[in-house]
């Protein structure tokens, strides 16, 4: 099975310069204009209309990055969780209006949690229950609209946390996302597993990957190859037929280089050795 076509995370102001590259190959896109608190809480009709006009002629898969600033899925206050759920449900509505079938949601798990699971016996179960409660109405809406939520690692140190949450909720419209840069930062700073192991731990629940590079210090969102991640095993893993996932380059600068970066990553995947039973 060939590597899935690599797409890109874009904002409206970036799309014109990438439109020909994206549309010609029906590349997947991830729209990232709706992440801000003021945007998601306000009137998005003009922004949605502008995107719909830009997307004429695009036949590739579409997704959006859901809102996340200050929106902790595990917030212990039920009333605050209701607001968070409403913001995420609006994100699902926006995704549907844009013909998108996927929305990225941020994980709440962090290093402090991991250190204190034994110190506070209620902590992990409480986090799981709060997340499940927060996401329940969002997932109901997502199922109606045909949108899958993918839970992205942020400050996670143990990939089992997100995996167990997705398994516990057990909803067909909830899968996993892996951000390569975030995984490497957790590896560098907290001793978390390396990127390749985070991808492997996601197993069949993996539906989406943010491809970006870092230096082990901050969330740089550099082009893959500009940081410290070893990309050959990552791309070999993602090219395996048992790991189909939507691949999105999520970089912050020099977007004109995206075609070159995508081609280089695809070449790494094509160079993966063919494993057979032959000696």
Image: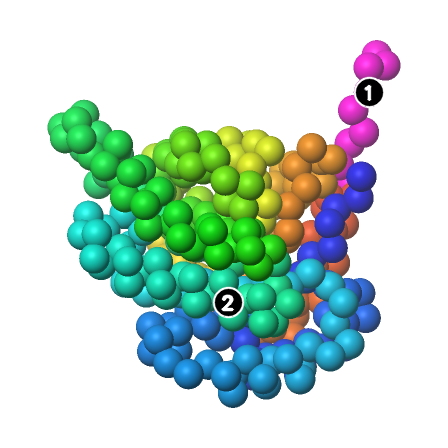
Q: Which quarter of the rendering shows the N terminus? A: top right
Q: CA distance from mark 2 to mark 1?
A: 46 Å
User: Which residue sits furthest left?
Assistant: 119
Q: Residue furthest top?
A: 279
Q: Is 91 displayed left or right of 206 in the figure?
A: left
Give the residue at x 26% y 55%: 81
Residue identifier under label 2: 93
* Residue that carries the numbered disc 1 in the rendered image: 276
Horizontal relation, residue 233 to residue 149: left or right: right
Query: Measuring 49% from the left and 62% from the top, which residue is drawn there?
Result: 92
- Give the mark nearer the N terminus: 2 vs 1: 2
Which residue does the image show at 78% across and 24% down from the upper left?
275
Q: Where is residue 113, by image quadrant?
A: top left
Q: Main secondary structure of the magenta part?
A: loop
Does the stretch in magenta take in 61? no
Instruction: State the SS at label 2.
Output: helix
Measured as percent of width and height from the top left, residue 176 is found at 51, 43
Range of residues picked out in magenta: 271-279
Percent x, y of residue 63: 59, 62
Q: Secondary structure at mark 1?
A: loop
């Amino acid at each position: 099975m060939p590597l899935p076509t690599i797409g890109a995370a874009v904002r409206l102001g970036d799309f014109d310069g990438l439109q020909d590259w994206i549309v010609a190959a029906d590349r997947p896109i991830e729209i990232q204009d709706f992440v801000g608190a003021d945007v998601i809480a306000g009137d998005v009709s003009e922004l949605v209309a502008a995107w719909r006009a830009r997307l004429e002629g695009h036949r590739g898969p579409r997704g959006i990055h859901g809102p996340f600033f200050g929106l902790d899925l595990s917030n212990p206050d039920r009333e605050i969780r209701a607001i968070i759920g409403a913001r995420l449900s609006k994100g699902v509505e926006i995704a549907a209006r844009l013909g998108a079938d996927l929305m990225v949601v941020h994980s709440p798990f962090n290093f402090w949690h991991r250190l204190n699971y034994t110190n506070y016996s209620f902590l992990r179960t409480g986090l799981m229950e709060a997340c499940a409660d927060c996401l329940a109405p969002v997932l109901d809406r997502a199922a109606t609209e045909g949108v899958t939520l993918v839970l992205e690692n942020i400050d996670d140190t143990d990939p089992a946390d997100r995996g167990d949450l997705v398994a516990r909720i057990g909803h067909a419209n909830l899968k996993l996302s892996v951000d390569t840069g975030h995984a490497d930062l957790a590896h560098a700073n907290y001793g978390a597993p390396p990127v390749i192991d985070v991808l492997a731990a996601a197993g069949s629940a993996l539906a989406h990957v943010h491809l970006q590079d870092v230096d082990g210090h901050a969330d740089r969102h550099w082009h893959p190859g500009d940081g410290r991640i070893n990309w050959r095993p990552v791309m070999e893993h993602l090219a395996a037929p048992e790991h189909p996932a939507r691949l999105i380059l999520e970089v912050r600068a020099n977007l004109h280089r995206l075609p070159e970066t995508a081609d280089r990553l695809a070449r790494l995947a094509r160079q993966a050795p063919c494993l057979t039973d032959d000696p």
